[in-house]
Image (cartoon, helix red, strand yellow):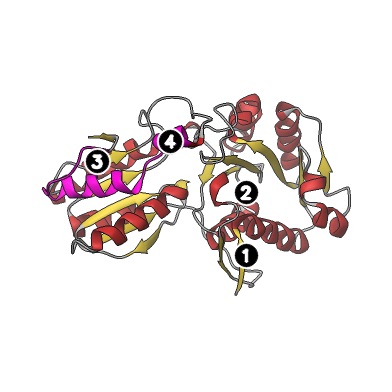
Amino acid sequence: MSEMTLNAAVGQALREEMQRDSTVMMFGEGVALSRADLLTEFGADRIRNTPLSEAIIAGTAVGAAASGLRPVIDMLYAPFLTYAMDAIVNSAGKLRYISGGQFAFPLVVLAQTGAGWGVGAQHTHNIEAWFAHSPGLKVVMPSNAADAKGLMKAAIRDNNPVIMLLDMSLGYNPGEVSDDPDYVVPLGRAHVARAGRHVTLVSYAKTTLTCLQAAEALGQEDIDVEVIDLRSIKPLDIGTVLQSVRKTGHLVVVHEAGPLCGVGAEVLAQVNEQAFSQLKSAPARITSPDVPTPSSYALEQAFLPQVAHVVAAVQKQLGRQTVATASVAM
């Protein structure tokens, strides 16, 4: 085990997969500079800078995948993916199905997401639900360095296109990461980050840490909270969520993306469909408001789900007195 940041863990996963498989390559805006160590080790044929054209990057990656390569593309910020939607959604996501499984499309799309750095609405937008709603695509969002490495390796090895969204504010968070080159976190498998008996909190990316902090605070009130880190948005491991909810009877879903048609709405719908009789209270979700991400750091913090919001929602689930400070959708 080694301690490293989430960003470093992604880089280590790239190096190990490029060493393991000569068809793995990476290109994107400035990657020959940001991944200079990989350029030195693997050469310009496998680490390539591109023009500032997201549509060209994604379209080239689809062609490379169809030709037998395993491209990883860095699109920098998640909102820039809007320029590449045609290649990602209409080509990468559909061509394997259209071909009747004759072709594989192993493509990994990296992009940074999440508020906290004050980069403004045109550089910050949580759009994971857009891609989860697109057939043929997989979507992952790690909350820590170990999962970032394991999910990255699994995504590169997968024969389908995978969108990997990295929360900007987690990039320099350190964590223990396995040195095993075969360490992989399977796509579609959630992680019980904290076991508990009274309430289930479901989250992913940096709001998982918010939930863990809230669970610690609630523990001071003798409220035993279970925290589930989805890790993978699609495939969605609803089985782990259902198992927890059937034990606790209470559910709060927390994520930074807005409320309408989000991941939280899907989780709540499936729990209501499959475990309604085990619920002891109406499940809730905590999200950001349905507005563009502010540039001001102070406004960003007001925009984000906070520990106090989660604590208040859990107290409400259990019928305890609370202060209505959360943006909670029921």
Residue extent of the magenta highlight: 298-325
Q: What quarter of the picture does the C terminus occupy? A: top left
Question: 163 above or below 217?
Answer: above
Kind of element beneath mark 2: loop
Disc number placed over residue 159 in the picture, else none? 2
The residue mark sitting in front, 1 or 2, is 1
Kindly identify the residue that appears in the image at 34 percent across and 50 percent down: 202
Kind of element beneath mark 1: strand
Q: Earlier in the sequence, mark 3 or mark 1?
A: 1
Q: Which residue is mark 3?
A: 284
Alpha-carbon span between mark 2 and mark 3: 36 Å
The residue mark sitting in front, 3 or 1, is 1
Residue 212 place in picture, x, y as percent: 36, 58
Kind of element beneath mark 3: strand
Residue 79 place in picture, x, y as percent: 59, 30
What type is the residue that disc 3 sits on? Answer: Ala
Left or right: 44, with 168 as reference point: right
Disc number placed over residue 257 in the picture, else none? 4
Q: Earlier in the sequence, mark 4 or mark 1?
A: 1
Q: Are marks 2 and 3 in contact (CB under 8 Å)?
A: no
Q: Are marks 3 and 4 in contact (CB under 8 Å)?
A: no
